[in-house]
C-alpha cells in the first residue's frame, strides 16, 4: 500500500516500474511536471514535481513508487515552492504549450523576480518545412534532446553551455541543414512550444473536436496514428500508444497528410468522351464499367491495391472471381514482396513474417538483408537503431552503405545481384564450422543430408569472387549469427526484387533453420513489407493462384467452399500474374482491366511496354485519388477515398490486423472505395448486402480460416495478429512454435544455385549498375508525398554516385544527368556519395518527370514474377 | 590535545624524492600491500579495518568510508570499479594536490588495497585537469608500481589483477560531484545523475562503483598496516585518524598541516598558521571551502570534527579554512562566491540554473547598494527554492553560504539596502 494525500493505492500498482508521479496521477493528484514524458527516460530537470515522500522532498518523476510510502503533494510548503519556482521559470523563458498553460493556471505572473536575464534574443529558426524553433520559450527541460536521442536515435540536439548560458543547440547553421529527419518527436514532446511545427502553427485557434485513432497508410510498419481534428481540418497527427510504434512516427506518417485536401484530388467520376476525360454522374460511370467488363469477361483482369483496405481487397477479388469467372486478380505485392511470400511458403509453410516488431528488442543479433530500413520503414529503422545503441549486434547485407550499415558490426557489402551466392556462402560456413542447431534440424527440418552435400560446394572462399565479400567476413558473420542466443532476421526489397528473389528469401529461411532460429521469441525471418497493406491484399486473395486465406484455386474443395459461400461458380483456371496480364493485353487476349489504387505506369518496370499493354486494351477503368499517368490512359476514372476518409482494416508486416477509421468526409463527390466496389458489383448483377466494412470483415472471418476469430470489436486497441482461429484466441505474435504447416509438419531446406541475372549478360546497356529505391521523405510514386511539404525536403529524384565515377564524368552533387539503356531514358539529380560502391548508382523513383522506370529492366523473379528493380546496367551522362 | 606529533601522509615530506617509488619504499611504503596480499588478509578483513578506523570521507561530505563500501551489492556479475575523486575544485582547498604531487605512492598503494578490499580490478583516478604536476606524478607512480608488479594483471604474483588509470579532468567544478565525475569519465558532459540509484549500485558504465576522495584512500595503507582501531584512536569520537588541514586568507603562514580530527580551529589558525597577518583583526572564517556557511571570529573555538562544526551552524567540508579580516565586506565576498556557483552550475535543473543566476545578480546589486524590492527576504526565498530541491548538492552549496552570511552578517547586509554604494568598502 502506498498513500498519496491520504488516498491509498493498492500494492499491485507498485511494481517497481512506476514512479511516485505515476502513482500521484493514478489517484488524481495534480503535480505539475514539465520535463517528464512516458516516451523517454527520466530527466529530473525541471524540479516542478517535488513532493514529500515520508517527509523527504524528492522529485516525483525520479522516485520509484514503493510499498509503504506516504506521499504528500499539496503541503503549503510545496505549493509555495512550485509557485515561486514557476516565477523563476517565467523570468527566463516565455513558455507556451502545456507548461505555459500550467504556469498560467498557477497564477505565475513573472513579476516576482524582476531582473529578467535575457527576455528575448535567443535563436529562432524557421528554415525547415515542418519544424519551427524559438528558444525564447525554452525552459531547458531537455525533452527534445531525449526524444531525438531515444526515440529516433538522430542526436540532432545538444545541450550547449553551462549554468545560465545553457541552451539547446543543433550544430552550426540553419536547422534545415542539421541531421534532422523530420520525425517530429521533438515538436510533439516539447512542453513549451519552443519547438513546434507547421501543423500546430496552421491550426492555432481551431478548437479540437475529436481525436481518432487510425492506421498510417504509408509503409507496412502500420504505425497507429492519433489524428487530432476540428471539423474538416486535420490539426495534427500524433503517434498513438501501440506496440507497433510506441507513439513514434516518421515524417510521412506525422506530416505528409495535407495531400488529402490537395486541389489535384479527383472529385468526380470521369469518362472518356471524344478522347477527353469528362465529368459524368456516378450512375453513368458505374454502369459503363460494369457493362464493359461484363462484355469482355472472362478476358478481364483486376489489379487490386495494397494501399487499400482488407475489406476492399476482399471485394475486388470476390467481384472478379464470382462475377466475371476469372482468377485474373493480382496486386502490387507482385512488384515487391511476392517473392517473400513464395519463398517463405516453400520453406516454412507460411508466406508472412514469423515474428513481431517487438522481437527487435528481444533479439541479440539482427541480420538485416536488402533493407535501408531507416528510410523505407523509418519507425522500425529507428527501433533497430535503438536496439543497436543498446548493444544488439547488427549484420547488414547490402551493396549500399546505408545508415544502418554504417552502424553495423559487420557490413557485407556484396556486388548487386549476388544475394544467392552470399547467403549460400553464409550457410556453407555454418555447416562447415558445425555452427548448427542439431536438435532443431533433427526434429523440425527436412532435407539436411542432401542440403549439407549441396552446400559444401558454396564455401565463402568459393563465392568470394562472385560476391566480392571477403570470406573471412562471411565467416565472422556466420559465427556472430549462430553464436547468438536469439538471432533474428529482417529483410527488404533488396532481397526480393531480383531475378532470384524468391530463392534468396528461401536461403534466408535456410539460415534460420540451420541455427534453429524459428518459432520462438526474438528470432525468425521477417520481411519488412513495403506497402501499408501488402500483407492484407495477399491475405485477402488478390493473387491469381489462390483466393482468401491462401486457399488455392486449383483445389476442388476450395472452389466448392467458395462457390457455396458466394453463390456463384468459382473459376477453375489459375489466373494471370501482373506481368502476364501485360503480355496478354499486348497480344490482344486480355480485353479489359480494372486498376485500383495504383499508378502502374510510373511504378512498374520497363514503363514503355506497360503503356503499350494498357493502350492495347479495349477498356481500362481506374479507381484513384489523384490523376496519374495510368488514369490518363483510362476510359473511366472513379474517384476513391484516402485512408482518412473511410473505414476498414490494414494488416501490417507483422500480420497485425488494425483498424482504419474515418476522420473526414471524402472530398467532393468521391466515395469510400468499398462502397464503389459494392456499387460496381451490384451493377454487374452481383449485389452485396454490405452497409459497412465491419460486415465485410464478418464475411471474411467466415471464409478465411486464419481470420475466424476476427471481428471489429476485437480490433479496438492493438488489433490482432493472424492466425486468429477462434473468437477467444489472442492472436499469434510468433508463428511455427510447434510445427510448420507443411507435409509432416517440418520445414524444408532448399538447395538453390546462384545464377547470374540475365540483366548482367546484357551489359550492352551501360557501364554502371543501377539500383532503384526510395528515400525517407517520399513514398513510392510520390502521388501523396509530393503533394505535401515533403516535396521541399526532397524536391527531385536523387542519383547516388561514387566519387570515382562522378570524377570520371566530371559530375558534382546537384548536376542533372541522363540515364540510358536499351529500355529507355531517365533523369536524376546527382548526389556524390560513398554510400554506393564504384560502378554502382542508385536512383529513386518518386517523381514522374524522372522516368526512373523507363530504364528498369524486363527481367523478373523466376518464381514469383517480381521485377528486378534492383539491377540494370545504365550509362550516365550530363543532361 | 593529543597526537599532535603523529604524522602519516606528511611524515616524510622532507624527503624531496618522496614521490619516487624508491624513496617511498625506503620509508616503508608498500609494506601494507605486502602485509595484506602476502600475509593472507582477506578483502573482508580490510573492509572491517576500514570500518573500525572511523575514517570519514575527506571529499567534503564526511560519509563513513567503511559504511559506503558496504553499499556494494553482495553478489554481482558486473565488474566493480573504484573511482578516485581527484578533481579538487572546492575554492580554498588544496590538500589533495599536496598528496598527489609529493606523496603519490600513498594514493596508489591505497588504491590497490581498496580495489582488493572491494573486489575491483579497475581503478580510475579522475584528476583535475589544471593540476599538471599532479597528473604527471600520478602517472609516473602508476608506471613505477606497474614495473614493480604492484599494479597489473598479477599483483605480487597473487593472481589479483589491479589496473589503475589516471584520467585528466575536463575543467569544471561540477566534475568533482561524484555522478558528474562518472559521466565525465564515460566521455559525456559532466552532469550529475538523479540519485538513487547510487553509484554503489549503478555507477561507472552502469556498474557498481565506489567513489572516494584522494585523501580518504591515501590513509588506507596506514590503516591496513596498523589496524583500524589504531587509526580511530588518533582522532576524536566517531572522527577517526588524522586529516590534512589547510588555512588560507589573511593569516601569517597559509599552508597545510596534518593533525588529528577534532583539534580546535583556533589551534589551527593561531598556532599553525601563525594568526592574523599585518595586525589585522579576524572578522570570520569559511571553515571548509566556499560551500560552507561562514562563522564569526568568536566562534573559532569549535572542534574540527564533523558533528561539532555542524552543531555550530556550519560544515567541516574539506577542512581547508579561509580566514577573512575586518574591513572585508561580506556582501562582496558572497558576491564572489555566488558568481562562482552561477558560473559552475551545470545548468540541468531549474532551481540551480536559474536560482544561482538570481542569487549572483541580486547579491551584486546589493553590493552596489541597490535596493532589492523583496529585501533580503528575496535572497532567502531563492535560497529556499534551491535548497534540497536539486539533482546534486551544488545547488545547496550555492545557497548555504548566502543563507549563512545573511544569518551572521545580517546587519551589514541590511545596511547595503538602498545605500547607493557599499557601506563597508565603498
Ligand atoms: C558540486 C560538488 C563538487 C564536489 N567536488 C569534489 C571534489 O572536488 N573532490 C572530492 O573529493 N569530492 C567532491 N565532491 C564530493 C563528491 O561528490 C563525493 O561525495 C566524494 O568524492 C566522496 O568521497 P569521500 O567519501 O571519500 O569523501 C563534490 C560534491 C559536489 C556536490
Ligand atoms: S526546446 Fe522544448 S523540449 Fe527542448 S528543452 Fe526547451 S522546452 Fe524542453
Ligand atoms: S544542482 Fe546545479 S549543478 Fe547540480 S545537477 Fe542541478 S543544475 Fe547541475
Ligand atoms: S517532471 Fe520531475 S523534475 Fe521535471
Image (cartoon, coloured by chain):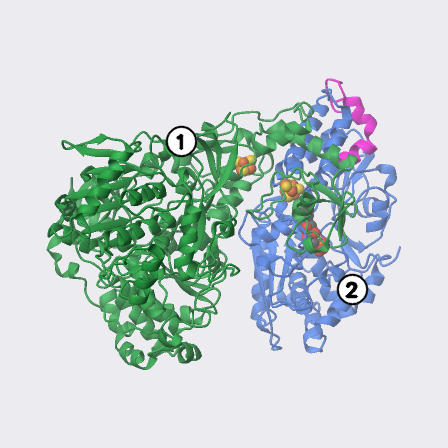
Question: A74 or B119: which is nearer to us?
Answer: A74
Please state the horizontal and vertical placement of residue B112, each as a whole percent of the image.
65, 67
Visible residue check, residue A287: yes
Q: Secondary structure at mark 2?
A: helix
Which quadrant is the N terminus of chain B positioned in? bottom right
Say which colour chain A has.
Answer: green
Rendered image quadrant of residue A111:
top right
Please state the horizontal and vertical placement of residue A414, each as a whole percent of the image.
28, 62
Residue marked by disc 1: A127
Q: Is residue A540 positioned above or below B230 on the image?
A: above
Residue, x 73% and y 17% (percent of image)? B420
Which quadrant is the C terminus of chain B positioned in? top right
Question: A736 or B58: which is nearer to us?
Answer: A736
Residue, x 24% and y 43% (percent of image)? A290
For residue A497: magenta? no
Say which colour chain B has.
Answer: blue
Other-residue count near label 2 (Cα within 10 Å), few / some / many at <14 / 14–19 / ≥20:
many
Label 2, label 1: how far apart the Cα atoms are: 62 Å
Residue marked by disc 2: B51
For disc 1, the chain is: A
Q: Which residues are magenta?
A: B401-426
Side (left or right) of B85 relative to A726: right
Please state the horizontal and vertical placement of residue A174, each as a whole percent of the image.
41, 33
Image quadrant of ligand 2? top right
Side (left or right) of A101 relative to A865: right
Amino acid at each position: 500500500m502506498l498513500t498519496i494525500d491520504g488516498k491509498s493505492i493498492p500494492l499491485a500498482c507498485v511494481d517497481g516500474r512506476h514512479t511516485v508521479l505515476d502513482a500521484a496521477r493514478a489517484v488524481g493528484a495534480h503535480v505539475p511536471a514539465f520535463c517528464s514524458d512516458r516516451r523517454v527516460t527520466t530527466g529530473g530537470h525541471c524540479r516542478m514535481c517535488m513532493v514529500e515522500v515520508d517527509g523527504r522532498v524528492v522529485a516525483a518523476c525520479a522516485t520509484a513508487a514503493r510499498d509503504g510510502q506516504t506521499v504528500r503533494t499539496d503541503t503549503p510548503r510545496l505549493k509555495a515552492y512550485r509557485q515561486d519556482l514557476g516565477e523563476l521559470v517565467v523570468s527566463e523563458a516565455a513558455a507556451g504549450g502545456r507548461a505555459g498553460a500550467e504556469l498560467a493556471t498557477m497564477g505565475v505572473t513573472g513579476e516576482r523576480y524582476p531582473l529578467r536575464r535575457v527576455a528575448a534574443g535567443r535563436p529562432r529558426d524557421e528554415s525547415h518545412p515542418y519544424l519551427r524553433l524559438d528558444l525564447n520559450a525554452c525552459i531547458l527541460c531537455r525533452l527534445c534532446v531525449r526524444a531525438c536521442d531515444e526515440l529516433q536515435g538522430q542526436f540532432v540536439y545538444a545541450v550547449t553551455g553551462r549554468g545560465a548560458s545553457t541552451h539547446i543547440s543543433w550544430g552550426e547553421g540553419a536547422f534545415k541543414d542539421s541531421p534532422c529527419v523530420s520525425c517530429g518527436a521533438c515538436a510533439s514532446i516539447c512542453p513549451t512550444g519552443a519547438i513546434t511545427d507547421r501543423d500546430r502553427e496552421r491550426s492555432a485557434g481551431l478548437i479540437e473536436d475529436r481525436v481518432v485513432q487510425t492506421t498510417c497508410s504509408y509503409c507496412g510498419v502500420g504505425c497507429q496514428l492519433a489524428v487530432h481534428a476540428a471539423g474538416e481540418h486535420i490539426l495534427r497527427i500524433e503517434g498513438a500508444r501501440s506496440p507497433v510504434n510506441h507513439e513514434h512516427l516518421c515524417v510521412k506518417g506525422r506530416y505528409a497528410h495535407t495531400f488529402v485536401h490537395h486541389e489535384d484530388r479527383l472529385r468526380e467520376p470521369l469518362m472518356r468522351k471524344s478522347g477527353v476525360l469528362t465529368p459524368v454522374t456516378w450512375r453513368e460511370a458505374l454502369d459503363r464499367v460494369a457493362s464493359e467488363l461484363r462484355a469482355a469477361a472472362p478476358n478481364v483482369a483486376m489489379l487490386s491495391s495494397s494501399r487499400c483496405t482488407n475489406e476492399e481487397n476482399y471485394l475486388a477479388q470476390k467481384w472478379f472471381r464470382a462475377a466475371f469467372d476469372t482468377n485474373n486478380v493480382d496486386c502490387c505485392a507482385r512488384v515487391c514482396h511476392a517473392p517473400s511470400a513464395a519463398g517463405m511458403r516453400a520453406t516454412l509453410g507460411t508466406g508472412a513474417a514469423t515474428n513481431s516488431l517487438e522481437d527487435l528488442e528481444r533479439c541479440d543479433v539482427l541480420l538485416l538483408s536488402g533493407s535501408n530500413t531507416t528510410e523505407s520503414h523509418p519507425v522500425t529503422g529507428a527501433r533497430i537503431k535503438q536496439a543497436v545503441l543498446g548493444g544488439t549486434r547488427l549484420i547488414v547485407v547490402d551493396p549500399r552503405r546505408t545508415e544502418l550499415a554504417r552502424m553495423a558490426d559487420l557490413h557485407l557489402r556484396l556486388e548487386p545481384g549476388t544475394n544467392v551466392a552470399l547467403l549460400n556462402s553464409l550457410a556453407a560456413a555454418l555447416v562447415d564450422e558445425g555452427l548448427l542447431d542439431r536438435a532443431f534440424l533433427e526434429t523440425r527440418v527436412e532435407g539436411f543430408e542432401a542440403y549439407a552435400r549441396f552446400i559444401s560446394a558454396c564455401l565463402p572462399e568459393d563465392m568470394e569472387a562472385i560476391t566480392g565479400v571477403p570470406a573471412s567476413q562471411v565467416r565472422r558473420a556466420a559465427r556472430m549469427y549462430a553464436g547468438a542466443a536469439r538471432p533474428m532476421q529482417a529483410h527488404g526489397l533488396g532481397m526480393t526484387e531480383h531475378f532470384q528473389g524468391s530463392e534468396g528469401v528461401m536461403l534466408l529461411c535456410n539460415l534460420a533453420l540451420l541455427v534453429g532460429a524459428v518459432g520462438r521469441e526474438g528470432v525468425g525471418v521477417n520481411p519488412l513489407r513495403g506497402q501499408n497493406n501488402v500483407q492484407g491484399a495477399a491475405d485477402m486473395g488478390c493473387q491469381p493462384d489462390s483466393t482468401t486465406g491462401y486457399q488455392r484455386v486449383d483445389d476442388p474443395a476450395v472452389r466448392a467452399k467458395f462457390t457455396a459461400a458466394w453463390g456463384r461458380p468459382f473459376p477453375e483456371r489459375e489466373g494471370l500474374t501482373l506481368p502476364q496480364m501485360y503480355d496478354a493485353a499486348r497480344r490482344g487476349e486480355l480485353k479489359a482491366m480494372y486498376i485500383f489504387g495504383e499508378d502502374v505506369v510510373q511504378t512498374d518496370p520497363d514503363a514503355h511496354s506497360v503503356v503499350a499493354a494498357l493502350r492495347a486494351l479495349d477498356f481500362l477503368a481506374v479507381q484513384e485519388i489523384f490523376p496519374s499517368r495510368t488514369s490518363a490512359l483510362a476510359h473511366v476514372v472513379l474517384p476513391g477515398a484516402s485512408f482518412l476518409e473511410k473505414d476498414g482494416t490494414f494488416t501490417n508486416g507483422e500480420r497485425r490486423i488494425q483498424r482504419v477509421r474515418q476522420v473526414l468526409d471524402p472530398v467532393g463527390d468521391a466515395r469510400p472505395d468499398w462502397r464503389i466496389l459494392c456499387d460496381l458489383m451490384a451493377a454487374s448483377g452481383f449485389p452485396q448486402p454490405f452497409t459497412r466494412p465491419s460486415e465485410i470483415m464478418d464475411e471474411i472471418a467466415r471464409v478465411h480460416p486464419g481470420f475466424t476469430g476476427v471481428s471489429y470489436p476485437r480490433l479496438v486497441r492493438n488489433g490482432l495478429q493472424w492466425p486468429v482461429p477462434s473468437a477467444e484466441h489472442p492472436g499469434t505474435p510468433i508463428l511455427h512454435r510447434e510445427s510448420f504447416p507443411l507435409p509432416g509438419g517440418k520445414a524444408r531446406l532448399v538447395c538453390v544455385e546462384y545464377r547470374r541475372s540475365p540483366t548482367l549478360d546484357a551489359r550492352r546497356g551501360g557501364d554502371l549498375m543501377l539500383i532503384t529505391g526510395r528515400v525517407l521523405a517520399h513514398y513510392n510514386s510520390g502521388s501523396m508525398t509530393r503533394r505535401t511539404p515533403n516535396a521541399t525536403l526532397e524536391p527531385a529524384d536523387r542519383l547516388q554516385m561514387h566519387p570515382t565515377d562522378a570524377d570520371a564524368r566530371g559530375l558534382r552533387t546537384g548536376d542533372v544527368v541522363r540515364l540510358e539503356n536499351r529500355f529507355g531514358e531517365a533523369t536524376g539529380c546527382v548526389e556524390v556519395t560513398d554510400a554506393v560502391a564504384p560502378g554502382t548508382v542508385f536512383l529513386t523513383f518518386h517523381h514522374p518527370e524522372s522516368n526512373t522506370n523507363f530504364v528498369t529492366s524486363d527481367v523478373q523473379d523466376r518464381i514469383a514474377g517480381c521485377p528486378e528493380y534492383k539491377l540494370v546496367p545504365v550509362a550516365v551522362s550530363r543532361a | 590535545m593529543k597526537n599532535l606529533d603523529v604524522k602519516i601522509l606528511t611524515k616524510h615530506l622532507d624527503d624531496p624524492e618522496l614521490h619516487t617509488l624508491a624513496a617511498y619504499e625506503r620509508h616503508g611504503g608498500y609494506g601494507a600491500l605486502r602485509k595484506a596480499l602476502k600475509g593472507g588478509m582477506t578483502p573482508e578483513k580490510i573492509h572491517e579495518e576500514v570500518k573500525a578506523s572511523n575514517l570519514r570521507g575527506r571529499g567534503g561530505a564526511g560519509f563513513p568510508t567503511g559504511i559506503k563500501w558496504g553499499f556494494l551489492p553482495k553478489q554481482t556479475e558486473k565488474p566493480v570499479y573504484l573511482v578516485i575523486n581527484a578533481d579538487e575544485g572546492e575554492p580554498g582547498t588544496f590538500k589533495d594536490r599536496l598528496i598527489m604531487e609529493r606523496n603519490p605512492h600513498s594514493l596508489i598503494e591505497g588504491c590497490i588495497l581498496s580495489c582488493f578490499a572491494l573486489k575491483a580490478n579497475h581503478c580510475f583516478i579522475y584528476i583535475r585537469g589544471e593540476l599538471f604536476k599532479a597528473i604527471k606524478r600520478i602517472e609516473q607512480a602508476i608506471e613505477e608500481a606497474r614495473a614493480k608488479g604492484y599494479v597489473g594483471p598479477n599483483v605480487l604474483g597473487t593472481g589479483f589483477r589491479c589496473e589503475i588509470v589516471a584520467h585528466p579532468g575536463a575543467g569544471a567544478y561540477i566534475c568533482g560531484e561524484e555522478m558528474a565525475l562518472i559521466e565525465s569519465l564515460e566521455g559525456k558532459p559532466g552532469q550529475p545523475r538523479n540519485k538513487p540509484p547510487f553509484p554503489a549500485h549503478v555507477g561507472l558504465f552502469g556498474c557498481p562503483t565506489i567513489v572516494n576522495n584522494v585523501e580518504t584512500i591515501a590513509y588506507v595503507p596506514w590503516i591496513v598496516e596498523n589496524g583500524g582501531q589504531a587509526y580511530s584512536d588518533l582522532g576524536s569520537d566517531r572522527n577517526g585518524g588524522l586529516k590534512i588541514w589547510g588555512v588560507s586568507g589573511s593569516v601569517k603562514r597559509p599552508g597545510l598541516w596534518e593533525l588529528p580530527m577534532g583539534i580546535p580551529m583556533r589551534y589551527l589558525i593561531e598556532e599553525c598558521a601563525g594568526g592574523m597577518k599585518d595586525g589585522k583583526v579576524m572578522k570570520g572564517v569559511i571553515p571548509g571551502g566556499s560551500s560552507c556557511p561562514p562563522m564569526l571570529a568568536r566562534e573559532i573555538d569549535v572542534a574540527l570534527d564533523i558533528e561539532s562544526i555542524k552543531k555550530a551552524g556550519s560544515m567541516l567540508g574539506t577542512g581547508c579554512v579561509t580566514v577573512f579580516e575586518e574591513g572585508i565586506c561580506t556582501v562582496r565576498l558572497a558576491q564572489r562566491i555566488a558568481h562562482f556557483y552561477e558560473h559552475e552550475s551545470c545548468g540541468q535543473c531549474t532551481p540551480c540554473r536559474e536560482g544561482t543566476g538570481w542569487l549572483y545578480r541580486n547579491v551584486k546589486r546589493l553590493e552596489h547598494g541597490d535596493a532589492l524590492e523583496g529585501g533580503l527576504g528575496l535572497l532567502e526565498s531563492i535560497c529556499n527554492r534551491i535548497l534540497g530541491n536539486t539533482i546534486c548538492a551544488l545547488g545547496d552549496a550555492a545557497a548555504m553560504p548566502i543563507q549563512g552570511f545573511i544569518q551572521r552578517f545580517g546587519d551589514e547586509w541590511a545596511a547595503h539596502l538602498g545605500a547607493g554604494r557599499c557601506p563597508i568598502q565603498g
